Image (cartoon, coloured by chain):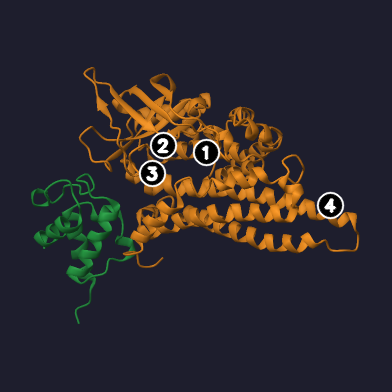
Amino acid sequence: MSVSVDRDQAFLDAVTRVADEFAAPNADAVDREARFPVEAIDALREERALSAFVPTELGGGGVSFEAIATGCFELGRRCGASAMVFAMHQIKAISVARHLDGAPWFEDYLRDLADEQRLIASVTSEIGTGGDMGRSVAAVTATETGACTFEKQAPTVSYGEHADDLLVTLRRAPDAEPSDQVMVVVRGEQRSLEQVSSWDPLGMRGTCSPGFVVRAEFAPEQVLPTPFPRVMSETMVPVTHILWSHLWLGIATDAFDRARAFVRAAAKQKPGETPPAALRLSHLMSELSLLRAEVGSALGEFVEICDEPGRERLSEMATALRFNNLKIAASEQAPKVCQGALAVCGIMGFKNDTPFSVGRHLRDTMSASLMIANERIHHTNASLLLIAKDV
Amino acid sequence: MTEQIRQIIADHGRLSVDASELAPDADLYHAGMTSHASVNVMLALEDHFDVEFPDRMLKRSVFESIAAIEAALNELRAETPVS
């Protein structure tokens, strides 16, 4: 066995244990109270899972991207909110790790992330951009003392108050175009958060994502040298869609498992008869397998081109279309599977306090089509399809 | 060819600056060209120069400046067999 395979296995054993022992028992309370999944995230810190993707030479775990994706799936099976916080953190850590390009401040930052298991949240969405991550209003603004500042109106910042640090997208300078963006990492002590809206949503309640006005003062070295559009196409967009879809698959898989347990219990009550719900379960299995196939193949395609040689292909429109399609397909299929599980379990699935409850699963996956709205992605795809050839 | 490219960018790029004053290596995206506008520039270039950009060329870096576009068009023309 290679070292990296051993590392991956150790990481997955640890994440699965955290999912079973910390995420699962608190999932209902996290959902009911719309509170941060502190038990699961603290346990992931204990396992040094927050720096799993950080290279070993910077003190991280050196775990593969496939293992990170599988970790999101395993957490998703036990608590959607815990999985989403973990996935979002990994998206930021992976974006920094893949694009720091030797920048000393960012290397030091990843060392600190590994040492102290620092949790990163992101401030990407902004009022006034129409939900387009590729545009910013707030800008890096130089002060007379040589420092930089910004003030950003963010409609949602997931777990912002619980994160140690923030990854923020901004215009390069006050006179830059909206699409001339850079990525900045600010540490907890450098920022202030002024909460401007509440958080009482239908699902993914434990992500704690109200709106904030975010202000910070930081050093110029904290601006990542790589332009943000490149980070977005080579890493942030595909990695986001892959990790999110893995955790949605995890939630849908648990809903399916609950439906299967319900059918088995019914079968045991009347031996010799196939319960009517068994047929619905069979239909549901094919829906789940479609989701699993799309999620799995997208991961494989990304891994094939994510490093040299081939990384250049991540910038191509055909690749953007591929991962946009993953997002649309998975975000629509996951709630469909959860709704099918509800149809299998009936009233026992509808009630929130039975072993077959799937209400949380359904509500959590209903957020999927809204997080980077599918209609916005269709709009982008419609434009790209005018010119892309082999898709 | 440079001037024809410049005119197509002026017509379809929706820049926030005057295209006639752009340096050949000036970043069009920094000059305000959005992803959506860049698709319209690509379509107009294909139409005007009677070429088809293959998928390997359909990426940001190929369309980020007048010089980059010109290089891509020259590469395509060099590849086209003379009939």
Residue that carries the numbered disc 1 in the rendered image:
A62
Return the mark for residue A337: none
Residue that carries the numbered disc 2 in the rendered image:
A96
Query: Could you say where residue A223 lies in the image, as x and y percent from the top left?
Result: 32, 31
* Sequence-first disc among 3 and 4: 3
Return the mark for residue A131: 3
Secondary structure of the residue carrying tag 3 is: loop
Query: Could you say where residue A321 lies in the image, as x and y percent from the top left?
Result: 41, 58
Query: Could you say where residue A142 lies in the image, as x and y percent from the top left?
Result: 24, 25
* Sequence-first disc among 1 and 2: 1
Q: Nearer the viewer, mark 4 or mark 1?
A: 4
Residue type at tag 3: Gly
Residue A5, placed above or below residue A326: above
Q: CA distance from mark 4 to mark 2?
A: 48 Å
- Give the chain letter for green: B
Q: Residue at x 63, y 47 (%)?
A: A362
Whether the residues at callouts 3 and 4 have beta carbons within 8 Å, the answer is no
Q: Residue at x 22, y 61 (%)?
A: B72
Most foreground residue, A58 or A361: A361
